[in-house]
Amino acid sequence: LSGLSGDSKSDIRYHLADILLSDEVQRRYDRIIIDAPPRLTTAHVQALSASTHVLIPTVLDQLSGEAVGSFVDQLVINAKLWPHLKVLGVVGSMTELGQEQPLRDYEQEGLLAIRQALEQNKDAHDLRAPVTAPLSRSCFIPDVADLGRAAGNRIGYLNPVASGRPIREMFDALGAEVVRAAETAIELKDLIRS
Amino acid sequence: MKVKEFVCVLREYARVIDAHGGNDLAAVMDQLIEAWSPAMTWSMKNLLGRSGPRAPLPEAEGVSVRDFREALVRLQHVVGSIAKKGFNDDLAALINSLEPHDKKDLAAFVVACQQALERVNASKTKADKSSNTSIDEALIRQYVERLQATHKDSAQFVPVYEELQANKRIKQAELAKIASLVAYETAAGTSRKEALRRIWLIHDNYATAAAKSKFSSGKSAA
């Protein structure tokens, strides 16, 4: 609150970055993954300001597709806050079928809405290229009961008694795709024409 | 439910049966799944309607159709209360379809299913070939290019879309192919109305994103 009222001299947007870049945190962790809400709250702004990359998970339906477009708009509009941020891609979550099977029609429609929104974002902001694109379908995370049960209690990936679908394999496929995307992702500042 | 989804459960169940000494039954179940492979994208209902044995089958000496049916009934008891309705319905339909062949040899039943599917696929391929020859590829390409070039602008897109809609040379199969190329994968048998709706989406999605961006300055409602 002191940051918002102007009483504090430090910039509230970079408080998390200050902590994550401290010697103590840097010594203890190789990678830090922050789960942030889709709204641009103070916490979310802090998370983006502290991050090198951002991955956008979304349910694949029409409305969520449009929300991805709005979110990417915000990333571009506020790019001055995170000029070095790289957008890794959009990953579908809670898909009806497993990674090896085709998407349902309504999910393909959601994916189409995302592609069109990203194209519109590129045109609206006169970018050199779209900010990002959907990742490969083979890394989308299906709606799995074990994951749902783990939500809010523990990390599903670490659940040793997961039955049914191989949770670790699903997330490993996503991890491999994220690594590939990180190699080609472009910083936001390089997408914006000066 | 699609065959490929149904067999995921059946395959796992065969492993369970195998681990509990039902090696012979598990092996024939695997053969049945293999026999169904040309029909993986069909619905179970469609498969069961088309893959039934056409000729009389020999009586069982080893594993009978009844052994398989009873194994499926046990599966039904286990998963009945937790599985999706679609799965339960298809499992019940499969069990019912097996009952008339109870005393017959399961391996012979599998071979008969395989032959029935081969016959269906052979006639389908013939039909596909004759319908493919009638598809006007050049016309499709031309419309795809025009739709993609104009989809960001209503004033340009709508006339092309209306022309496509009214063009009598564009049949249902052509529309489905155009929808596949400009929107997303669309089955060849998709109706004209549905294919047109999908084609319209490429413009509608873009226009919606533009309107939302303009009036919300990019702010998410989420």
Image (cartoon, coloured by chain):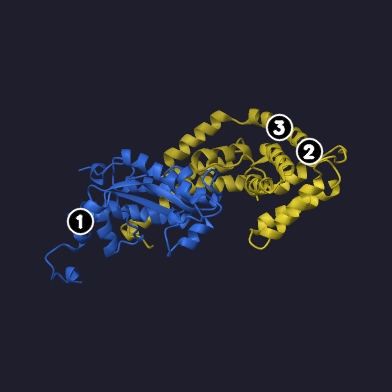
Side of A33 relative to A24 (left or right): right
Which chain does the residue under circle 3 lie in?
A: B
Image mark for residue A134 = none
Which chain does the residue under circle 2 lie in?
A: B
> Does dot 2 land on a helix, a strand or a loop?
helix
The one nearer the camera, B86 or B156, is B86
Q: CA distance from mark 3 to mark 2?
A: 31 Å
* Circle nearer the viewer, 3 or 2: 2
Q: Amino acid at mark 1?
A: Glu
Q: Colour of chain B?
A: yellow
Residue B202 placed where, x, y %?
47, 46
> Does dot 1 land on a helix, a strand or a loop?
helix
Residue B184 placed where, x, y %?
51, 43
- Which residue lies under the disc numbered 3? B127
Side of A125 relative to A167 (left or right): left
- N-terminal label among 3 and 2: 2
- Which residue lies under the disc numbered 1? A24
Q: Amino acid at mark 2?
A: Ala
Chain shaded blue: A
Side of B118 relative to A177 (left or right): right
Q: Callout 1: few (<14), some (14-19), or many (20+) C-alpha neighbours within 10 Å? A: few
Q: Quadrant of the N terminus of chain A?
A: bottom left
Give the quadrant of residue B85.
bottom right
Marks 3 and 2 belong to one chain: yes
